[in-house]
Image (spheres, rainbow, N blue to C red):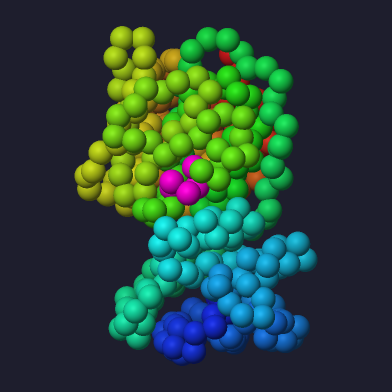
Amino acid sequence: MNPIKVLLVDDSAVVRQVLGAALAEDPQVRVLAAVANPLLALEPMKTCWPDVIVLDIEMPVMDGLSFLKKIMAERPTPVIICSTLTEAGARPTLAALAAGAVAAIAKPKSNLRELLHDTKTELLHAIRLAAASRPRVAPVARHPLETAAPGQRLVAIGASTGGTQALESVLAALPANAPGTVIVQHMPEKFTAAFAERLDSICAVHVREAGARQLVRRGEVLIAPGGRHLQIKRIGNNFWAETLDGPLVSRHKPSVDVLFRSVAQAAGARARGIILTGMGDDGAAGLLAMREAGADTIAQDEASCVVYGMPKEAVKKGAVARTLALGQIAAAICAA
């Protein structure tokens, strides 16, 4: 197998030196170049196009987001954002994910040499995942559907790699009176609140990060907070969303399986489960539980996925009643 060709773009000489050396130790990775800004990256890209780009956001000459948009417009390539995961940095990183980046990992602000060695395993995993992905800028429907079918239903959605784009595409197409929707998107802490805020600004439905305990209402979307599981309980004729701490489930917190299993128990045939693009198998078992409880279950099709991992595993388990292209999912959410 040919090594994965990686281009490292970061204005910190220490980051370039330490990460470049760490990546070079892996025989499955070949570092094409480690450069200080996007303009310097253009030269090595003329002779050898990278399989994966590891990109900082805040840089002189040209910022990472502008470079990312240029790359995605000209030749879509897997890009990993490597930045500090702070509240102040969440919005630009989310903007990068919306623009086509396939992943974001933490870059420490201090003790760089020591801490970047701890980042090596996470970065190598992200690089292998990115190399297997098919990045694209998902078209976003800015005009929501005209009507939504009557009847109270609960919609549960799970997503991972590529999910930020996919969710933006789906939610922006929903009408203001769409069914109450709960979502698990694999995302670090401090990102989910900013992600919900961004979606709320472009959607007719109201999107927010889920709190400790709240009612799921028509026209509202609740996103599981990073680092906490989200589950649904039924009280009378209403559905309530609750967040809780606990161990990793299917290697994730929040876990799609936790959400889907709780929806299967609480909502049964009144629910619709949707699994979108993502690596791994989180959500497959939970979606099967939903289908066995009488829920309608949908998987995003392979052609429109950035990573056809989670949907594929759900299909293999027999958890999926039907497979739809990304552009068809908003209409499916609103169908009776």
Q: How many marks?
A: 0
In the image, residue 111 above or below residue 306: below
Task: From the viewer's side, name the closer residue of 281 and 180.
Answer: 180
- Quadrant where the N terminus lies? bottom right
Q: Name the residue rendered at 34%, 23% in the picture.
A: 240
Magenta part mainly helix, strand or loop? helix
Q: Position of residue 227 (x, y in %)?
A: 32, 49
Q: Which residues are magenta?
A: 192-196
Vertical comparison of 212 with 78: above or below:
above
Of residues 85 and 244, the one nearer the viewer is: 85
Quadrant in the picture for the C terminus: top right
Measuring 63% from the left and 72% from the top, which residue is drawn there? 63
Q: Position of residue 206 (x, y in %)?
A: 53, 31
The residue located at (68%, 70%) in the rendering is 67
Q: At which x and y percent is residue 315? A: 50, 37
Q: Is residue 159 visible?
A: no
Residue at 27 percent across and 49 percent down: it is: 248
Magenta-colored stretch includes residue 193? yes
Q: Is residue 336 magenta?
A: no
The extreme left residue here reads 246
Left or right of 8, for residue 253: left
Q: Compared with residue 278, is residue 174 higher up or lower down, i.e. above or below?
A: above
Residue 213 in sight? yes
Quarter of image, res 40: bottom right
Q: Residue furthest front?
A: 88
Is 328 on the left-hand or right-hand side of 4? right
State the residue in front, 175 or 26: 175
Residue 184, given in percent of the width and then of the height, sits at: 42, 40
